[in-house]
Each structure stands twice: as C-alpha cells, then as structure tokens.
Image (tube, rainbow, N blue to C red):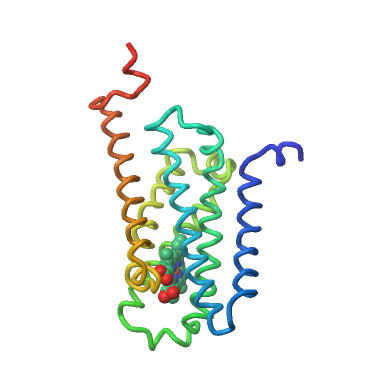
Amino acid sequence: MMSLFSNIRFYVLILSVVLSLGEYFFIQQWFSDREKVAMLVPLYAYTALVYLYLAMLAGPLTKVFPFFPFRASYLKARRAIGVSAFYFGVLHARFAFYDFLGGFAAIPFLDTRYRIALVLSSTAILILTLMAATSFDYMVKLLTFPKWKMLHRFVYVAAIFILIHAILIGTRFQEFLIIRIVLGIGTVFLVGLHIVGLLRMYKIFKAPEDSHG
Ligand code: HEM
C-alpha cells in the first residue's frame, strides 16, 4: 500500500481521472445543451493528444538532455501518461461516435473523408488499447522486452493516424491557425530530438557528457 502512494504513476492516473471529471462538469455547467457535445469532443481529443505527446517526448528529450530536471520521475511516469492518453482517447471516441456522429446508424450516411478518418482513428484506438493493456511490469516480463518494445513502437503509427484524423475532420483544427502551428512545432521538435538522438548513437554528434574530455 505504501509503495502505491510513493509511485508517481498512481498520481498521474488520479490526476487524469480528476481532470476528465473537471472538464466534463465544466462543460455541463457553462454551455447550452446544443453546445455541450461540440465542446466536450474536441476538449477530450486535445487532452488525449497532449498526453500522447508528453508520453512520446519523454524518451528522446531525456536522452538528448540527460541533465533534464525530474528526468527519472518523468521517465517513471511515462507509462501512466500513455495510459491517460488512451483514457482520454476513449472518452473522446465515445462522445464523438455516439453523441456527435449518431452511432452505428449514421455510418451509411458518412462521406468518404469521414470514413477514412474513422478507420484511421479506430486503428489508433486499437493500438493505444494494446499499449495500455501491456503497460505493466508483468506484461513486459510475459512478452519479453524486445517484443514489448516493438509493440510500443506502434505509438508512432497511432500518432500519425490521429494527426491525419484531426486534419481530415477536426473542426477546431481547421478553424484555428494556432492549433496547426503548435502541432507543427511540436512535431518538428519531436522529430528533431529523434534525429539528434540517432546521430549521437552513431557518434556523429558528441553527447554533452562526452564533450568534457
Ligand atoms: C474510434 C475512435 C474515434 C472516433 C469515432 C473519433 C471521432 C472524431 C470526430 C467525429 C471528430 C470531429 C469533431 C469535431 O469536428 O469537432 C474528431 C476530431 C478529433 N479527434 Fe477523434 N475520434 C476517435 C479517436 C481519436 C483518438 C484516439 C484521438 C487522440 C488520441 C483523437 C483525436 C482527435 C482530434 C485531435 C480531433 C480534432 C478536434 C477538432 O479540431 O475539432 N480521436 N474525432
């Protein structure tokens, strides 16, 4: 019991549940019935995206900047951050599919753009589900680390599918330039960190700790 309360993953998961409830009740309180779903769907979507980004950033950021403050805690929290991305993704998908689109009955009336976006997002949800279901030490042992790592590399496929999904059907994404700019900068930063990490691995760049002597 003691170890649960000293585990940062526990606090990340509690924070995510509290945040999801806070967002839900905020929308219920401040928006009209007509606006509620249209606000809740993108709010959960972008919260999921922020968590996903933070989970994907942890590895390359702490590798390129080994003296990054709270490095150990950030890396330890990474799996819970990933599970939170899955949690908000499911919340978003639930409200988007049933309340925003109209559920299975609406599928025959959706145009091709929507159908492609939904196939991509369903695949992304499947990947996030598999990742969340295997985000425990027990599963790492069961799968063995190389296979577990390989499965978790699919997060890049999920992220690309989610981005295309948002580009195709995101109302806020199309409406607000700032969202496109932030996502663009975030993507370039993440890809840049990976490139620097790879160059260092092949010793083309020297890591800061190597450059002292
Ligand atoms: C089967 C699963 C999913 C369904 C049915 C679904 C459905 C939708 C729909 C209908 C929209 C358009 C909402 C609007 O115009 O305001 C949307 C947008 C979006 N979705 Fe999903 N989605 C799913 C999975 C995901 C996942 C897993 C993520 C992220 C982790 C995600 C992220 C987004 C984002 C960022 C937007 C753009 C919101 C906006 O700019 O308005 N979606 N989704």
Front-lying residue, 46 or 129: 46
Q: Can residue 37 be seen in this view?
A: yes
Residue 177 vs residue 173, the one in the foreground: 177
Quarter occupied by residue 22: bottom right
Name the residue: 39% across, 38% down.
60
Please indicate whether residue 96 sits to the left or right of residue 186 in the image. right
Q: In this view, does 68 lie above or below 97?
A: above
Q: Position of residue 122 (x, y in %)?
A: 43, 68
Give residue 197's position: percent from left, percent from top: 32, 34
Q: In which quarter of the image is the N terminus?
A: top right
- What residue is at 32 percent from the left and 11 percent from the top? 213
Furthest residue in direction left, as rendered:
204
Residue 26, horizontal then vertical, whole percent: 62, 69
Specify whether 111 is left or right of 17.
left
Q: Which residue is drawn at 42% across and 62% down?
A: 124
Image quarter for ligand 1 equals bottom left
Q: Nearer the viewer, residue 96 or 104?
A: 96
Rendered view: 208 above or below 109: above
> In the rendered view, would you say 192 is above or below 181?
above
Specify whether residue 118 is in view.
no
- Considering every residue shown, the one lying at the far right of the view is 1
Residue 191: quadrant of the picture: top left
Q: Which residue lies at the image location 44% right of the left edge and 86% below the top edge? A: 106
Residue 202 placement (x, y as % from top left): 26, 28
